[in-house]
Image (cartoon, rainbow, N blue to C red):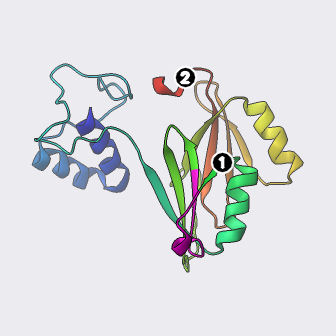
């Protein structure tokens, strides 16, 4: 499964010809929606298990992003996204803010962004599950946060909005345990 996940990640950044060359050179099967084991929690027959012949990744730890203004971004991640702040060592407080997104996974905000961030919903974005998409939409409206609402091909409502730096977030309603996604 880890090879399939890596294949999907590589596919996201490489052109089709480069992706095909990567798969052939690394002996990874190209990922597709019909690839058995392409969803977390599923395993394909004959799939390698973590060990000495691969990286042995077991789960996500954190995502680190550059922001222009740590205090302003920290307010957004705490008060809008509702993430729990994680203590940062005293010597890093001026340049870092850490937030728990659940299950020990975090978003780390790093001071020093100088380039403009331009994300769109068909490109780079961070997707999160919410308990109730209607409640989330009402919250965004009440806070006057601009957002885009769309209905996905399978009827799932998605909301897209940006943080103060332009990083785009996608919200999806998760009716089941996120361990199944």
Q: Which residues are magenta?
A: 87-99
Considering the numbered disc 2 on the image, is that residue within a helix, a strand or a loop? loop
On screen, residue 25 above or below 89: above
Label 1 neighbour load within 10 Å: few <14, some 14-19, many 20+: some
Q: Residue furthest front?
A: 90
Q: Position of residue 142 (x, y in %)?
A: 89, 47
Quarter of the picture holding the N terminus: top left
Magenta segment: does it hold 172?
A: no
Q: Which mark is residue 83?
A: 1
Q: Residues within 10 Å of mark 2 (few under 14, many from 20)?
A: few
User: Would you say 91 lies left or right of 24 here?
Assistant: right
The reply to whether the magenta stretch includes residue 98 is yes
**Image coords of residue 14 (percent x, y):** 31, 55
Query: Tag 1, which secondary structure?
Result: loop
- The residue singled out by tag 2 in the image is 177
Indicate which label's residue lies in the foreground, 1 or 2.
1
Q: Which residue is farthest right?
A: 142
Q: Position of 126 compared to 71: left or right?
A: left
Classify residue 137 as left or right of residue 96: right
Residue at x-position 26% and y-position 37% = 2
Residue at 18% in and 45% down = 23
Q: Percent x, y for residue 19?
A: 25, 50
Q: Residue furthest bottom?
A: 114
Q: Residue 81 versus residue 20: which sits nearer the camera?
A: 81
For the residue pair 97 and 114, the one nearer the viewer reads as 97
Q: Nearer the viewer, residue 8 or 122?
A: 8
Q: Residue at x 37, y 50 (%)?
A: 12
Question: Between residues 90 and 136, which one lies in front from this camera angle?
Answer: 90
Residue 68 image point, x, y percent: 62, 75
Dot 1 or dot 2, earlier in sequence: 1
């Amino acid at each position: 499964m880890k090879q399939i996940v890596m294949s999907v990640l590589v596919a996201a950044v490489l052109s089709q010809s480069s992706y095909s060359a990567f798969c052939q050179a690394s002996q990874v099967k190209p990922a597709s929606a019909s690839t058995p084991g392409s969803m977390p929690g599923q395993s394909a027959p004959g799939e390698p298990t973590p060990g000495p012949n691969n990286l042995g990744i077991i789960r996500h730890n954190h995502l680190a992003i550059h922001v222009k203004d740590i205090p302003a971004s920290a307010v957004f991640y705490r008060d809008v996204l509702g993430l729990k702040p994680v203590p940062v060592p005293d010597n890093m407080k001026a340049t870092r803010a850490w937030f728990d997104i659940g299950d020990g996974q975090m978003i780390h905000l790093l001071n020093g962004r100088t380039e403009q961030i331009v994300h769109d919903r068909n490109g780079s974005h961070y997707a999160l599950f919410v308990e109730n998409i209607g409640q989330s939409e009402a919250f965004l409206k009440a806070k006057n946060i601009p957002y885009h609402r769309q209905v996905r091909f399978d009827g799932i409502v998605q909301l897209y909005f940006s943080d103060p730096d332009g990083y785009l977030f996608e919200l999806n309603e998760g009716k089941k345990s996120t361990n199944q996604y």
